Amino acid sequence: MKVLLSAYACEPDKGSEPGMGWHWALGIARLGHEVCILTRENNLPSLERALALHADLRIQVAGYDLQRWMRWWKKGGRGINVYYSLWQRGAYRAARRLARETPFDLVHHITFANFRQPSLMGRLGLPLVLGPLGGGEATPPLLLWSFPFRGITVDSIRLLLNLFARLNPAVRQSFRQAAVILSKTRETLAYVPPAYRAKCLMMQDVGTEEALILSEQPASPPTPRFLFVGNLLYLKGIHLALQALARMHRDFPGATLTIAGDGRDRKWLQKMADRLGVAHAVDWRGWVPREQALSMYREHTAFLFPSLHDSGGTVVMEALSQGLPVICLDCGGPGAMLPPSCGFKIEVEGRGREEVVDGLADAMRKLAVNPELRAEMSSRALKAARENTWGHIVSRTYRHIQDTLRNT
């Protein structure tokens, strides 16, 4: 097949959406398909350098961007949604020109993959694949009040935007035009109107890089050491991790938490660590290079990632690839993708902060007192990583897409 990939975010050696766009492009091409990546112009240099190392794959790139004077919308992330909406309109016109030159078999809108942000690619008259879509995840209501005031406000507005998106004619048109709708989480799937649910496939969007998966499981550290990697934002649930660490200290005063990352809520979190009496047990590393982060996974007891409404979970798959058991909440992307045998998923439905923190602390204790359990989960983590490489995920998904197109 000839696939036009609409990938606003697509960059090699990056995480999150840019990395996802790149890995999906590679995966589709490795299945033998021809791929044309339509992306932002500033992504082209890094893509062209990377593609020089993959000359055997049939991938070409095309860039589109708004005029320079319009790009102030996205500076500092303040108007990224407005900027992206304007970009979509111009990208559709660029895609229409590409489609006149190349007889594409389908168009796949992959990034940004938020259900609130409709794609215009369905207007090309080609079979449209939407997603994997996210964005429908929301903080469990009883945990919303654990946020700072700003977080409560922002998350409440986000929930209202999600509800209004159901009424957006452009969103409904995207669902109607799609041949296949891919959803990352059950929360996002719930926002797809029932009339279009038959087109939907629940699937994992993030894979592991086969070359980076450890060949054997790492040894457990002598004292309990837990690791968080990511942005220091209220929605990542780090405040819950700090409270769980404080409860762990009642039985394991030597337990530590390493936090690799930075963000606007760092000071709030550091004050909380002081107030909880665990400041001495928290190692604030700031941003670290990816290679260093991978080695850090191998030096800890478990990966503690209590994010409250992540759509994906790249770091969860990275942890599994390094044989590290994961403790997360049973919601959003991390809850959807973590196999139960590879860690603990803490129930959040109907639970308040105290119960959830107790659940996190209990999981931490179980791994601290039972090295055999930790070793079993580590072994299963590596197995899960090998079964969920990018190649496996893209292959499974495109098998479904091709079967669907053949039957329509």
Image: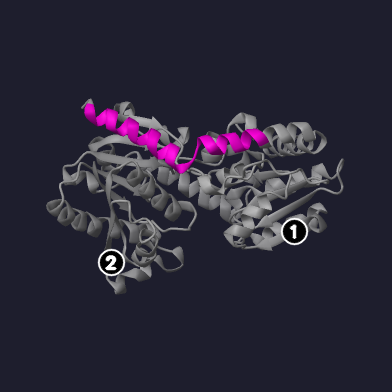
Q: Residue at x 46, y 48 (%)?
A: 158
Say whether residue 364 is left or right of residue 214.
right
Q: Residue at x 81, y 42 (%)?
A: 248
Mark 1 lies on a secondary structure that is: strand
Q: Which residues are magenta?
A: 379-406
Q: Could you tell me if residue 159 is visible in this image?
A: yes
Task: Choose top left, top right, bottom left or bottom right for residue 213.
Answer: top right
Seen as rendered, the residue at the extreme front is: 56
Name the mark on residue 283: 1
Q: CA distance from mark 1 to mark 2?
A: 42 Å
Look at label 2 and name its amino acid: Leu
Report the front residue among 136 and 252: 252
Q: Could you tell me if residue 329 is visible in this image?
A: no
Name the residue tied to disc 2. Answer: 66
Quadrant position of the C terminus in the picture: top left
Q: Position of residue 14 (x, y in %)?
A: 48, 57
Say whether residue 43 is left or right of residue 359.
left
Q: Position of residue 343 (x, y in %)?
A: 66, 35
**Mark 1 or 2 closer to N-term?**
2
Report the front residue among 241 and 12: 12
Report the front residue among 394 and 138: 394
Main SS type for the magenta part?
helix
Mark 2 lies on a secondary structure that is: loop
Dots 1, 2 in contact, CB < 8 A: no
Say whether residue 275 is left or right of residue 111.
right
